Image: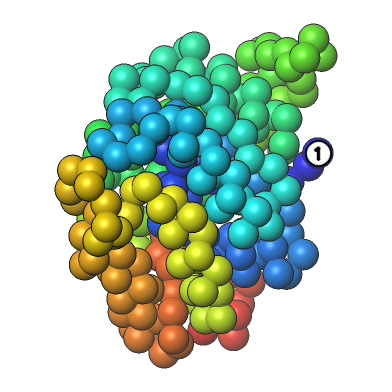
Amino acid sequence: MKLDILAFGAHPDDVELGCSATIAKEISLGKKVGIVDLTRGELGTRGSAELRDIEAAKAAEILGVQVRENLGFADGFFVNDKEHQLEIIKMIRKYRPEIVLCNAIDDRHIDHPKGSKVVSDSCFLSGLVKIETELDGVKQDKWRPKVVYHYIQWKNIEPDFVVDVTGFMDKKIDSVMAYSSQFFDPSSKEPETPITSKNFTESVEYRAKDLGRLIGVDYAEGFTTERYVAVENLSKLK
């Protein structure tokens, strides 16, 4: 199956928090989108890997993505090496996306910049014909996405561009809250974490509102890019 966009996250819920409104908008425009989680989030303070699997499937259904896979890398301990790159390359060659979305280049959680770098490097390597991979016993052809964009996570990194996601925030919030074990729940008896506060949950919306304010719309999501963003002509800029 060929996808238009493939979004990677170091943990289940990274994609939802970072760029799910953009994904929902692209799907509404007829684009085929998939998600690949690198780990099962098994080191998370709350919940369990098994529960995160269920929550991730629910979030994928809410967003309407074509496919969601999990590579089962070790949460907290995966590295940017040949072994991990090859597994990501297999996904890139399997789905042949034009656009890859991945973790923030710098962030509080160490897995986020690691995930950002290993996915970005794998996108380049996936285009090299002398790197041979097989999936289900079938040799894969090389494939390099046209662009790699990084969504914004905990840190308020200055975006290189923003996407107007007005009309898609409800779906984003629903997909985020599908991870009920991870976020604000006043009845929970589990330990508090930086993402379980009401303030954090509310920040998902108020960050999008603030980015939207800066471009004159209701809501927006921000991204950084590895190369210049090109436009066809000045009238295409909003």
Residue sitting at 39 percent across and 32 percent down? Answer: 48
**Could you say where residue 98 lies in the image, as x and y percent from the top left?**
67, 47
What secondary structure is found at the residue carrying circle 1?
Answer: loop
Q: Which quadrant: the N terminus?
A: top right
Q: Is residue 99 left or right of residue 155?
A: right
Q: Is residue 119 left or right of residue 190?
A: right
Image quadrant in which you'd find residue 145: top right
The amino acid marked with disc number 1 is Met
Q: Nearer the viewer, residue 182 or 189?
A: 189
Image quadrant in which you'd find residue 187: bottom left
Looking at this view, name the residue that lies furthest to the bottom.
Answer: 216
Q: Is residue 145 above or below residue 73?
A: below
**Could you say where residue 182 lies in the image, as x and y percent from the top left?**
34, 48
Residue sitting at 49 percent across and 74 percent down? Answer: 169
Image quadrant in which you'd find residue 126: top right
Residue sitting at 30 percent across and 35 percent down? Answer: 44
Q: Nearer the viewer, residue 139 or 65?
A: 65
User: Which residue has dot 1 on it?
Assistant: 1
- Residue 87 shows in the view: yes
